[in-house]
Amino acid sequence: MSDRTVISVAGTPGYDVVVGRGVRHQLREALPPAARKVLIVHQPTLGAIVNDLREELLADGSLEVLLAEIPDAESAKRVEVAAFLWQILGQADFTRTDAIVGFGGGAATDLAGFAAATWLRGVEVVQMPSTVLGMVDAAVGGKTGINTAEGKNLVGAFWSPRAVLCDLDLLDPLPRNELVAGYAEVVKAGFIRFPEILEIIEADPERAVDPSTPEFRRTVELAIRMKADVVGEDFREAGLRETLNYGHTLGHAIEHAERYQWRHGAAVSIGMMFAAELSRLAGRLGDDAVERHRAILTSLGLPTSYRAGAWSQLLATMQRDKKARAGQLRFIVLDEIGKPTVLQAPDQSLLFAAYQEIAEEQAPGGVIRVGAR
Ligand code: GLY
């Protein structure tokens, strides 16, 4: 385990994000020493690895290990699935000193975190993300929750994990399109904080998204460091954390328009292109930086345009989201690469003009659809 990288997240208490190959085997050390029971909440595709992990934990002799297989992706984030976990915890007499492990993509870690936040008013959770998106975003920062019929993430809690183990071995079998879509959040970290990420992609986009390369590892670690720094400073999203929403305001509206059949990163990619154009039209960002967005996203196979006729629908969704948060329409824009800021209540004509810059006759295909390999 010599090649592991430890990234600390500040807080009371803080915690470590451990990145490296094989770090899942550190799970016992990451659990609370006093725990006598552990519930591993995992997605179906991870069943074989989970059984091995269970054997490892049982070898310790001091733990009872329970497994809960949950549905894939967003269908895990339902109150019925949370109730299924509460039932297991209740029947197993889980106490405050026991612990939950979230093992899977962002939906699995969000749900496991939510179960941990709510059981006995809070038990410890160790997150083991198995996707790029989970490692660089969902599993770090303590946002947990489930969806309701009225919208995504409407029920939840800020609940920090005890540790996050990012085992890069888990990424090797993933379909390329899933890696690329998850990598959009790494690119975001390049645009809003660490231009080094952009330089690495520009040098060789194929190597950047290949989990076997040092370039991939470096960029993923930088993205995690960014997230760790931001949530360490602003856990409850009073200010700085909002900058992580770069590309997400329009991105969420696109996900909604596509009935959540698009990968999150694909929608965010278009959202970032829109945010860059908006930054330029607002007189903040230069042409070169905007074209850099287009070139980098395109070089990775990520989409940068969306249907010309969709604007009024997208705007209505963004307005509704805004109302749900009792605020004004706000976009994260860039003053320059690495310098995000908030653009509050921009003029609708400015928004429309920015959209015209990314509008196409047809929606793009390829990488974006859930299930496309
Ligand atoms: N995914 C954005 C955040 O954690 O704040």
Image (cartoon, helix red, strand yellow):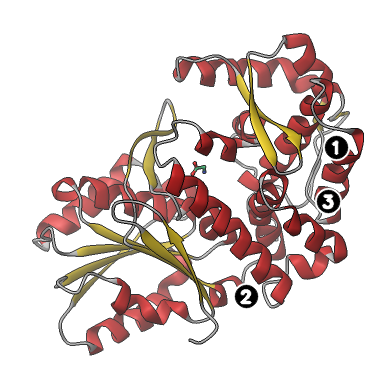
Q: Nearer the viewer, residue 196 or 34?
A: 196
Q: Are marks 1 and 3 in contact (CB under 8 Å)?
A: no
Label 2 SS: loop
Alpha carbon separation for disc pair 1 and 2: 32 Å
The residue located at (59%, 30%) in the rendering is 256
Label 3 SS: helix
The amino acid on which the numbered mark 1 sits, given as a three-letter code, is Val
On the image, numbered disc 1 is attached to which residue? 290
The amino acid on which the numbered mark 2 sits, given as a three-letter code, is Asp
Q: Tell me the number on the disc at residue 296.
A: 3
**Residue 285 horizontal side relative to residue 339, left or right:** right
Q: Tell me the number on the disc at residue 45.
A: none
Q: Quadrant of residue 270?
A: top right
Residue 349 seen by the camera: yes
Q: Quadrant of residue 275?
A: top right
Q: How many marks?
A: 3
Label 1 SS: helix
The amino acid on which the numbered mark 3 sits, given as a three-letter code, is Ile
The tag earlier along the polypeptide, 3 or 2, is 2
Q: Quadrant of the C terminus?
A: bottom right
Q: Please rate how many residues cluster around mark 1, counting C-alpha atoms within 10 Å: few if below 14, some from 14 to 19, many from 20.
A: many
Alpha carbon separation for disc pair 3 and 2: 23 Å
Q: Please rate how many residues cluster around mark 3, counting C-alpha atoms within 10 Å: few if below 14, some from 14 to 19, many from 20.
A: some
The residue located at (24%, 89%) in the rendering is 59
Does 60 appear above or below 36?
A: below
